[in-house]
Amino acid sequence: MIIEFPKTTTGKISKALVNIREEGGAVALGRVLTLVISTSPGKEEDAINAANEASREHPMRVIVVSIPEESTNITNRLDGEIRVGGDAGASEVIILRAYGEAGSDELGLVTGLLLPDAPVVVWWPGEAPQALSSSPLGGIAQRRITDSAEQPDQLAFLPTLASAYAPGDTDFAWTRLTPWRQQLASVLDQPPYEPILAAEVKAADTSLSARLLAAWLSLSLDIRVTFTPVPDRPGVGSIQCVTLTRSSGDIVLERTEPGMARLVQPGQPEHVISLLRRNLRDCLAEELRHLDPDEVYGRILSDGMNLIVEQA
């Protein structure tokens, strides 16, 4: 069910939520958190679809704040929309489209709509503020999620992430690494338990995820890891190969085609394994599982990035 509220106020939307709950049953009960999505007109649906899918694992209230990136001829107006039932997955979705002065106070727009006594997560699926934790929405959130791949220059965004990091910040460039980290950790948990003498990550030159992976390996293995840029292979993924060198030979994990990789280890047959690229739903669902600060991610930004040796 979709209910539209043209030229409205947050107070009217809040009252409408109460009426929907009374008429349709306990719609809001069982919600475990509030997810606030800060975006712009025309870019809401992909984020809402990801949130709806993730809500099957994390029932929640989703508040979408949509403010134009450029000025419009509308000086002061708030349009609202409520989605419940089949149009909202296992969540309830509130969309606030604010124009002019109505969009000057993001915090004021969402405050009256937050679930009481529930954690707040803020997600910027597009361009993010410079300092997440001190931004109006970031200041009320336990977790703050960005996506460096959606920034105008993701490598230039890295110093911003590092300098303004606060516990609770995270980025989908890090979340997308989970399959790589799981596979590499699984390999190193198997004999022979020889130390890793050297490591190399090959990826597209613009890949922030690859640099985060190299930094994670550096901190985990206590070695300096080489990052080698290679030509991008569209559809395959920005990270193409990780090589770990032991005295007995090289361990090679190489993505050969979309969703697939080959694993080569000394003295063992070559294995073909699944190594899928993660979509928005998978990344969002993972971040919502852990509302405590990601200390490993924080250490990588503060210490690990300085350990990477970048090849020209």
Image (cartoon, rainbow, N blue to C red):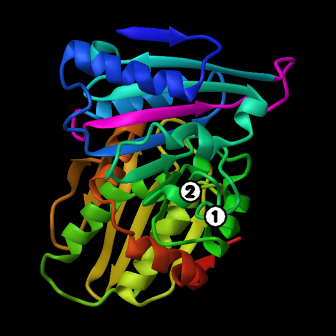
Determine the secondary structure under disc 1. loop
Residue beneath disc 2:
138
What x and y, as percent, mark residue 242? 41, 65
Residue at position x 60%, y 80% in the image: 309
Majority secondary structure in the magenta region: loop
Crowd around label 2: few <14 · some 14–19 · many ≥20 (10 Å): many
Q: Which of these two is toward me, 78 or 272?
A: 78
Determine the secondary structure under disc 2. helix
Q: Which residues are magenta?
A: 56-75
Q: Reply yes or no: does residue 193 show up in magenta.
A: no
Calculate the distance from the C-alpha at mark 1 to the C-alpha at mark 2.
Answer: 6 Å
Crowd around label 1: few <14 · some 14–19 · many ≥20 (10 Å): few
Q: Quadrant of residue 114?
A: top left
What x and y, as percent, mark residue 301? 55, 75
Q: Which of these two is toward me, 253 or 239?
A: 239
Residue 295 left/right relative to 182: right
What x and y, as percent, mark residue 201? 49, 67
Residue at position x 60%, y 46% in the image: 107
Q: Which of these two is toward me, 72 or 280?
A: 72
**234 to 245, vertically: above or below:** above
Residue beneath disc 1:
134
